[in-house]
Image (cartoon, rainbow, N blue to C red):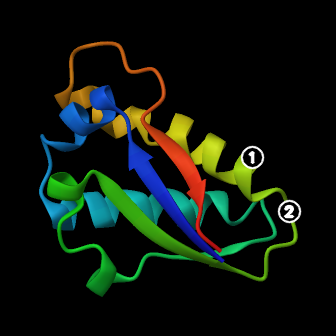
């Protein structure tokens, strides 16, 4: 299952404070932590995500999905606000929108 995380306007401003590698590291770390509580395997293909800030999209792949993927990614959206708030002083609402590509 392919999923695009399309960053909102405020989300784009927040991710603009990071390099592509930093974003990959942040999302990988938070996905790994969340995967311990959800029955889902999520991967971030580096070759598909070379311009996250410019495109405003993070492309991920989910396998072995035995939970609600929307709930997983909503919680991920809440969790990644923590590091984003360190470099983005404004209040962050939703960081990204979840689009199932299949």
Q: Residue furthest front?
A: 101
Residue 63 at x, y percent in the picture: 70, 82
Query: What residue is drawn where x is 27% and y is 51%?
Result: 56
Query: Quick one: 101 or 45, which is closer to the camera?
Result: 101
Residue 86 at x, y percent in the picture: 24, 29
Q: Which mark is residue 67?
A: 2
Q: Identify the element where label 2 is drawn.
A: loop
Image position of 27 (left or right of 14): right
Query: What residue is drawn where x is 30% and y is 66%?
Result: 24
**63 w.r.t. 60: above or below:** below
Query: Quick one: 7 or 91, which is closer to the camera?
Result: 7
Q: Residue furthest right?
A: 66
- Work out how far the residue at label 2 is from the one at label 1, CA to CA, in angstroms: 8 Å
Q: Residues within 10 Å of mark 1 (few under 14, many from 20)?
A: few
Residue 84 at x, y percent in the picture: 30, 35
Residue 8 at x, y percent in the picture: 37, 34
Question: Which quadrant of the figure has residue 20?
Answer: bottom left
Which quadrant: the N terminus? bottom right
Q: Residues within 10 Å of mark 2 (few under 14, many from 20)?
A: few
> How many numbered dots are placed on residues in this image?
2
Query: What residue is drawn where x is 78% and y is 62%?
Result: 38
Q: Which mark is residue 42?
A: none
Question: Which quadrant of the figure has residue 48?
Answer: bottom left
Which quadrant: the C terminus? bottom right
Query: What residue is drawn where x is 81% and y is 69%?
Result: 39
CB within 8 Å, label 2 to label 1: yes
Image position of 61 (left or right of 81): right
Q: Identify the element where label 1 is drawn.
A: helix
According to the picture, the residue beneath numbered tag 1 turns out to be: 71
**20 w.r.t. 84: above or below:** below
């Amino acid at each position: 299952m392919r999923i695009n995380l399309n960053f909102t306007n405020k989300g784009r401003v927040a991710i603009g404070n990071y390099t592509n590698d930093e974003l990959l590291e942040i999302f990988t770390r938070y996905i790994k932590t969340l995967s311990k509580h959800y029955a889902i395997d999520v991967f971030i293909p580096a070759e598909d995500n070379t311009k996250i800030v410019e495109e405003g999209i993070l492309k991920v792949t989910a396998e072995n999905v035995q939970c609600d993927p929307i709930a997983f990614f909503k919680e991920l959206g809440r969790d990644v606000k923590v590091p984003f708030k360190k470099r983005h002083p404004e209040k962050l609402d939703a960081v990204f929108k979840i689009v199932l590509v299949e």
